[in-house]
Amino acid sequence: MGTVNIGAFRHKITFLKAINRKGNVSQLQKTYVPVSSVFADVQVQPTIESVIEGNLVFLEKIHVVAYSSREINTNCVIRWDGSEYNVTSVIHDRVKPFMELDAIKMLTNESN
């Protein structure tokens, strides 16, 4: 991790963690509960093209730098600017109290 500019931590993001529970007919239901809200540096990366179920989909990717939290991992979701993003990678700095994350915007049917 290079130099971190904490003055760029101007975007408020919320980390969510998935909780699985059983529904009415014993099917698993995924519910997202907030873990923490922090200020971070969020940078939108170039859009990724992907084919999902035979359709061409453009996936938005973000890169986030924030203060480190050990409870954040790739099972978490980031809520930012009215959208939710699946965390795809987390790198904790070993010397400084920061972490870098990459995340991809969730499709509308994923966040239910």
Image: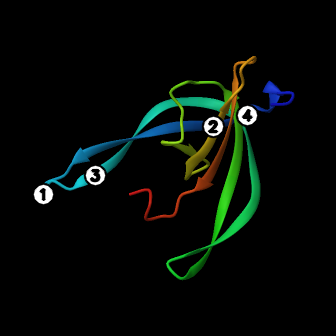
Badge 1: residue crowd in 10 Å (few <14, some 14–19, many ≥20): few
- Residue 29: image tag: 3
Q: Determine the image quadrant of residue 60.
A: bottom right
In the foreground, 57 or 112: 57
Residue at the image point whose x is 54% and y is 32% from the top = 72
Measured from the top left, where is residue 77 in percent x and y? 51, 44
Mark 4 to mark 1: distance in Å?
Answer: 44 Å
Q: Tell me the kind of residue under disc 4.
A: Arg
Q: Look at the numbered disc 4 and give the secondary structure of its residue.
A: loop
Q: Look at the numbered disc 3 and give the secondary structure of its residue.
A: strand
- Up the image or down, 18 lies above or below 37; here it is below
Q: Which of marks 4 and 3 is nearer the N terminus?
A: 4
Q: Which residue is denoted by mark 2 in the rendering? A: 90
Q: Look at the numbered disc 2 and give the secondary structure of its residue.
A: strand
Q: Tell me the kind of residue under disc 2.
A: Val
Q: Which of marks 1 and 2 is nearer the N terminus?
A: 1
Measured from the top left, where is residue 8 in percent x and y? 80, 33
Mark 1 to mark 3: distance in Å?
Answer: 11 Å
- Residue 25: image tag: 1
Mark 4 to mark 3: distance in Å?
Answer: 34 Å
In the foreground, 83 or 93: 93
Badge 3: residue crowd in 10 Å (few <14, some 14–19, many ≥20): few
Mark 1 to mark 2: distance in Å?
Answer: 35 Å
Q: Which residue is denoted by mark 4 in the rendering? A: 10
- Relative to 84, 43 lies left or right: right
Q: Look at the numbered disc 1 and give the secondary structure of its residue.
A: loop
Residue at the image point whose x is 53% and y is 82% from the top = 54
Measured from the top left, where is residue 100 in percent x and y? 70, 35
